[in-house]
Image (cartoon, rainbow, N blue to C red):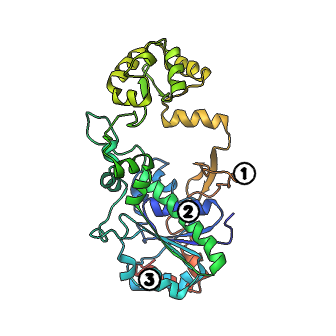
Amino acid sequence: MLAGLKVLDLGSALAAPYSAMLLADLGAEVVKIEKPRRGDMIRATDSYVRGESGYFLGINRGKDSVTVDIRKPEGRDIIRKMIVDFDILVENFRVPRMAEWGLSYEDLSAINPRLIYCSVSAFGDMPGFEQTGGNDIIAQAYSGLMDITGNPDREPSRTGSPVVDVSCGMLATVGILAAVHNRTKTGKGTHIRANLLEAAFALMPNYVVSVLNGEPNFTRAGSGHPQIAPYQAFLTKDQRYVVVGAFHNTSWQAFCDVIGRQDLPQDPRFKTNSDRVAHRKELSAILEVELLKRPSHEWVEMFERNEILAAPVLNLKDAFATFSKLNGDLIAPASHDKLGSIKMLRHPMSYDSKTPEVSRGAPVLGQHTDARLRQFGFTQQQIEAWREKKLV
């Protein structure tokens, strides 16, 4: 769908590289610039996939890897020569860094006026935070997301996955695609800015307006929800958890019928959702006792028969085992130059009932350096000289 678009990925870690990977999934040609010898910092985070980092493999498929040290003037000169051929650049350095290096949007758009330039940072231009670094957990802490995550009698908790990084990467991709559309009308590029703090705020649209305009008491509720009840996980007889979302009146009545507690909807503490939220502790204590009377699979079957939203809490292995059997396209084989065939999660959307093909795994560090640099007119002799100087 994006065939013909060329993306230069100067990002590291998660948010910016994830955005570039989504563009690669959709057919864009993506070249990832990495630091010589070390590469992207997340190449060293783990070694779960036959000695390679699963973290890196999961965020960089479909890209070419070119090693250039852009911290050195000669490396920046290489980028300036390359940028003429690219439509999109993504980066996630601290806000002033690219300007200090002469690689800002203003610098590069002077070379390529059609360039779409996406800057991902921790805090954007927030006064006092312009040069402050950050990552997913920092944004979760500053935004209040951590304060509402976890059990009420325990310390704040980060979410199980890096939701802020991922959401920021997705928002960056939305901005890039909007800029591509705008360029078809104007012929000009755009500077897009996305930051982790605002991505974290964007993850809480159901809370933000209430906080800005009222005095709600949103606190940690474990697996529960500060605005609706029951909407949480319950331990069952077989020591497995089941989640139930039965907060509106019809599903609440049906839920009580299934568990044999027809008296609960008549209790003034539990009549409406607002009542149940106000008396969450008392309600949870009652329901916890009831849900221990049957194993998880029985509860799920009974709830589903009565059109009550419920599900078992699966671990990742069980989740993939369950849904890959139901949809054989969920897990896609991809090729990796060092590992051979590896399994990847497919692109998360379909278009006209078709899902973009995922066939190329993440690149080996520097795998495409020589070929790509020769493509931009550099000679093999130059490349070898740079390699001696540890520039590439």
Tell me the residue at 39%/33% (across/down). Answer: 224
How many residues crowd mark 1 within 10 Å: few (<14), some (14–19), many (20+)?
few
In this rendering, position of residue 83 left or right of residue 214: right
Q: Is residue 381 above or below residue 148?
A: below
The residues bearing labels 2 and 1 have C-alpha atoms spaced at a distance of 20 Å
Q: Are marks 3 and 2 in contact (CB under 8 Å)?
A: no
Residue linked to disc 1: 354
How many residues crowd mark 2 within 10 Å: few (<14), some (14–19), many (20+)?
few
Of badges 3 and 1, nearer the viewer stands 1
Quarter of the image with the N terminus is bottom right
Tell me the residue at 67%/51% (across/down). Answer: 350
Decide if residue 238 is in sight here. no
The circle on residue 36 is none
Residue linked to disc 2: 174
The residues bearing labels 3 and 1 have C-alpha atoms spaced at a distance of 40 Å
Between 365 and 207, the residue placed more toward the observer is: 207
The circle on residue 76 is 3
What's the residue type where badge 3 is placed? Arg
- Give x and y (percent) for residue 233: 43, 28
Going from the N terminus, do you reach mark 2 or mark 1 first?
Answer: 2
